[in-house]
């Protein structure tokens, strides 16, 4: 399971960072940076909430890494 | 009154322009910019206004763009099924955050700078709150207090059998107090044709169009002007647009039950609402040319009659009627809601919703759709008749000379009949009688002059008309010609 990102959509709302600082941060231009794109089963709920909180629809969760 | 124009003397209270003693009302209230400004300021943000129907937003994330006086609003349903009314204006630069008529979304992202508001209660504390702003870190150093910058919430919402009403004033009385005994007409609008409570829904889209008329002409017409029917609507009666076709009436009354029937006295409430009929005046469903329609509605009427009689409730009260100030409707044939949104003193945006039973079969819906289309809306024949009048009345009242002369509201002055309903009276005659309009403009002036809630409540605590009427006339109310 990993995080999908379309950087072209990111507008730096930072909602993902507020929801989950372990996986998301903002760079100097204010856009999202994935600190870790791998998602463990234990983190699933928190990452899913962070992904869902993106107003720009730039993030998603990829269930199947295969 | 003719010399006391606002131009000459400066504009005092609008109650000076509504003379109930003589039955004269100044034309200024239909054309004057300053009076319109006061209506927007003091009347609409304090009145209970119809914003839409719950069936228009059945699922989480559904929204319907509506209007409350001068302000655009969004009727929404959140992820828990709760209904909200939000001001459709971004808190950053005021942009209309939603420019669609209706749809489904869990967030409104402003097209200007992309402030994003959520109606998902899982993401924000209160649905409608600010969910995020672009460049939160760079622009606000993460310090923007998002909770304080959500879409403005309308504080009072009341869903009455699916009809959604809202009021901006936290001090306003409850919806029930505001409506009073007029609720019987709302019941007949919201209940199904067979009397099942609230079992109705909005049918297809909402028709919207603009007319060059003051909004009050519309409200007044539906709240009890049965006097205009014979002249204004002569052509639609000649054509025969009603359920029974040629030779039958447009609202579906049978031949002995038209608006000329003796007992169709109007009902006027001290609170400003009015109806073109009374609860005792029963009009069974129409005769239809189509056997399946005849059968369906005969069964519906029988079921309704049994249900209401068991509740000791009269079967009349289908309007047309107006809930003060600008929600008009008809609860019979057609069954439809019309809101007159004020745009300027001389322009109004009219919205028409059509109502149908939730469980109505397809042939009934299709039949009603055709009837509603030929009756109402910008292309409906009855509606066109009315719009011609309102447009030309407004335009011809704009003239400098015309404005010196008041309108005449003297029909049945002092001849009101008593009513069993709370703070209400009936007209002295089924066709003549402008008691409803007089009461509407009295209440209008009280709101527009910005009287306080305690003052407004005190004035409407009793109905001075009800104590002044002759009680022996009561048996005439509700009686039809055939009863004689």
Image (cartoon, coloured by chain):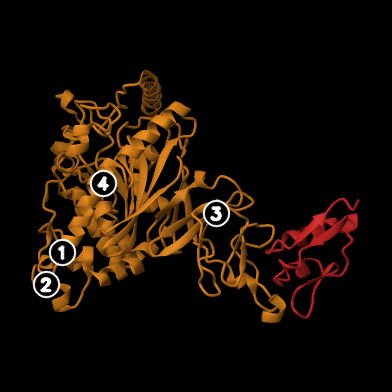
Residue nearer the viewer, B269 or B131: B131
The answer to whether the residue labelled 1 contacts the one labelled 2, judged by CB atoms less than 8 Å apart, is: yes
Q: Which chain does the red colour mark?
A: A
Sequence-first disc among 1 and 2: 2
Chain B, hue in figure: orange
* Disc sitting over residue B26 in the figure: 1
Quadrant (top left, top right, bottom left, bottom right) of the N terminus of chain B: bottom left
**Horizontal and vertical percent for residue A5?**
79, 63
| Quarter of image, res B345 | bottom left
Residue under label 4: B384
**Horizontal and vertical percent for residue B289?**
31, 21
| Quarter of image, res B128 | bottom right
- Asked if labels 1 and 2 share a chain, the reply is yes
Determine the secondary structure under disc 2. loop
Q: CA distance from mark 1 to mark 4?
A: 26 Å
Residue under label 2: B4
Residue under label 3: B76
- Asked if labels 3 and 4 share a chain, the reply is yes
Determine the secondary structure under disc 1. loop
Horizontal placement of B272 versus B170: left or right?
Answer: left
Q: CA distance from mark 1 to mark 3?
A: 40 Å
Q: CA distance from mark 3 to mark 4?
A: 32 Å
């Amino acid at each position: 399971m990993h995080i999908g990102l379309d950087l072209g959509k990111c507008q730096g709302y930072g909602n993902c960072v507020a929801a989950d600082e372990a996986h998301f941060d903002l760079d100097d231009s204010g856009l999202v940076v994935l600190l870790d794109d791998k998602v463990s089963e234990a983190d699933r709920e928190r990452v899913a909430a962070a992904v869902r909180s993106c107003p720009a629809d730039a993030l998603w969760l990829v269930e199947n890494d295969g | 009154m003719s010399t006391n124009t606002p131009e000459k003397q400066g504009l005092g209270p609008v109650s000076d322009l509504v003379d109930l003693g003589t039955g004269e009302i100044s034309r200024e209230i239909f054309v004057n910019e300053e009076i319109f400004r006061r209506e927007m300021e003091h009347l609409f943000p304090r009145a209970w206004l119809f914003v839409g129907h719950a069936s228009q937003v059945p699922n989480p994330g559904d929204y319907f763009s509506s209007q409350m006086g001068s302000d655009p609003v969004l009727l929404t349903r959140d992820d828990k099924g709760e209904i909200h009314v939000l001001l459709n204006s971004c808190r950053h630069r005021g942009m209309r955050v939603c420019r669609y008529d209706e749809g489904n979304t869990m967030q409104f992202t402003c097209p200007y700078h992309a402030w994003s508001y959520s109606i998902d209660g899982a993401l924000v504390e209160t649905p409608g709150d600010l969910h995020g702003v672009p460049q939160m870190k760079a622009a606000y150093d993460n310090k923007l207090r998002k909770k304080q910058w959500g879409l403005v919430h309308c504080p009072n919402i009341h869903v009455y059998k699916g009809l959604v009403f809202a009021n901006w004033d936290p001090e306003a009385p409850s919806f029930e107090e505001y409506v009073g005994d007029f609720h019987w007409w709302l019941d007949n609008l919201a209940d199904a044709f067979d009397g099942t409570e609230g079992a109705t829904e909005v049918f297809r889209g909402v028709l919207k169009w603009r007319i060059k008329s003051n909004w009050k002409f519309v409200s007044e017409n539906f709240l009890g002007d049965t006097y205009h029917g014979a002249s204004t609507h002569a052509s639609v009666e000649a054509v025969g647009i009603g359920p029974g076709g040629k030779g039958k009436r447009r609202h579906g009354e049978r031949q002995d039950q038209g608006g000329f029937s003796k007992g169709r006295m109007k009902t006027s409430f001290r609170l400003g609402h009015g109806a073109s009929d009374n609860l005792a005046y029963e009009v069974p469903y129409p005769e239809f040319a189509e056997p399946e329609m005849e059968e369906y509605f005969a069964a519906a009427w029988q079921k309704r009659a049994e249900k209401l009689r068991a509740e000791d409730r009269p079967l009349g009260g289908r309007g047309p009627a107006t809930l003060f100030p600008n929600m008009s409707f008809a609860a019979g044939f057609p069954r439809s809601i019309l809101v007159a949104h004020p745009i300027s003193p001389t322009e109004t945006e009219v919205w028409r919703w059509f109502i149908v039973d939730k469980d109505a079969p397809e042939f009934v819906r299709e039949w009603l759709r055709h009837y509603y289309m030929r009756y109402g809306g910008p292309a409906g024949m009855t509606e066109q008749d009315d719009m011609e009048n309102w447009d030309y009345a407004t335009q011809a009242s704009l003239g400098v000379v015309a404005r010196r002369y008041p309108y005449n509201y003297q029909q049945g002055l002092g001849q009101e009949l008593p009513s069993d309903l709370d703070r209400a009276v009936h007209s002295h005659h089924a066709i003549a009688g402008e008691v409803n309009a007089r009461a509407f403009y009295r209440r209008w002036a009280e709101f527009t002059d910005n009287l306080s809630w305690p003052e407004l409540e005190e004035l409407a605590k009793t109905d001075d008309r009800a104590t002044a009427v002759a009680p022996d006339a009561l048996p005439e109310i509700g009686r039809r010609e055939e009863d004689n």
